[in-house]
Image: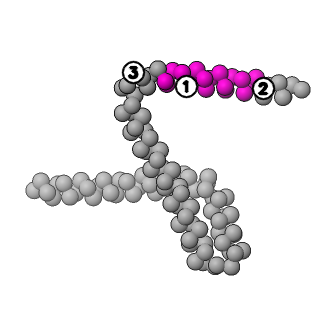
């Protein structure tokens, strides 16, 4: 009985992951549309036809997937490192440096806009 419940839970997990990915893809489609059209157009101009377009799309998908996996892994790593007192000090220093850089960039952009 427990094995049946566990199997049902894993099916729900797979279905849930699929649905989340599907909805996420629909949302991201508006951002990716231009890139996808450019990839298909480039593949059509090179003369490789459908095979070239498929290879180009697979390469794009792999690159995008690597970014998503890296982001997910970095979240876990940052949670693990957040308990360290050394990382707390480094984090504060980075925040101050980045804040100063953003402030300086803002002043520079205002100056460009005024002159």
* Residue picked out by circle 1: 94
Of the residues tagged 1 and 2, which is closer to the observer? 1
Residue 85 seen in the current view: yes
In the image, what residue occupies the spot 64% across and 79% down? 49
Give the main secondary structure, helix, strand or loop, of the magenta stretch: helix
Q: Is residue 19 positioned above or below 110 on the image?
A: below
* Outermost residue to the front: 86
Q: Position of residue 108 (x, y in %)?
A: 78, 26
Q: Is the residue marked by circle 3 packed among few (<14), some (14-19), or many (20+) residues within 10 Å?
A: few
Report the mark closest to the observer, 2 or 3.
3
The answer for how far apart the CA atoms under marks 1 and 2 are is 21 Å
Q: CA distance from mark 2 to mark 3?
A: 35 Å
Asked if residue 91 is positioned above or below residue 79 in the image, the reply reads: above
Determine crowd level at label 2: few under 14, some 14-19, many 20+ residues with C-alpha closer than 10 A.
few
Q: Which one is nearer the viewer's eye here, 49 or 91?
A: 91
Is 57 colored magenta in this rendering? no
Badge 3 is on which residue? 85
> Horizontal and vertical percent for residue 13?
30, 53
Horizontal placement of 20 versus 30: left or right?
Answer: left
Choose the circle earlier in sequence order: 3 or 1. Answer: 3
SS at circle 2:
helix
Range shown magenta = 90-107
The quarter of the displayed image where residue 57 is located = bottom right
């Amino acid at each position: 009985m427990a094995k049946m419940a566990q199997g049902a839970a894993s099916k729900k997990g797979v279905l849930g992951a699929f649905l989340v990915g599907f909805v996420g893809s629909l949302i991201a489609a508006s951002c990716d549309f231009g890139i996808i059209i450019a990839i298909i157009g480039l593949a059509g101009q090179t003369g490789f036809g459908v095979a070239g377009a498929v290879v180009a799309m697979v390469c794009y998908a792999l690159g995008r997937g690597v970014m998503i996996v890296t982001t997910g892994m970095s979240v876990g790593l940052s949670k693990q490192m957040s308990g360290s007192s050394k990382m707390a000090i480094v984090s504060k220093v980075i925040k101050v440096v980045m804040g100063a850089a953003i402030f300086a960039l803002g002043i520079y952009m205002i100056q460009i806009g005024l002159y």
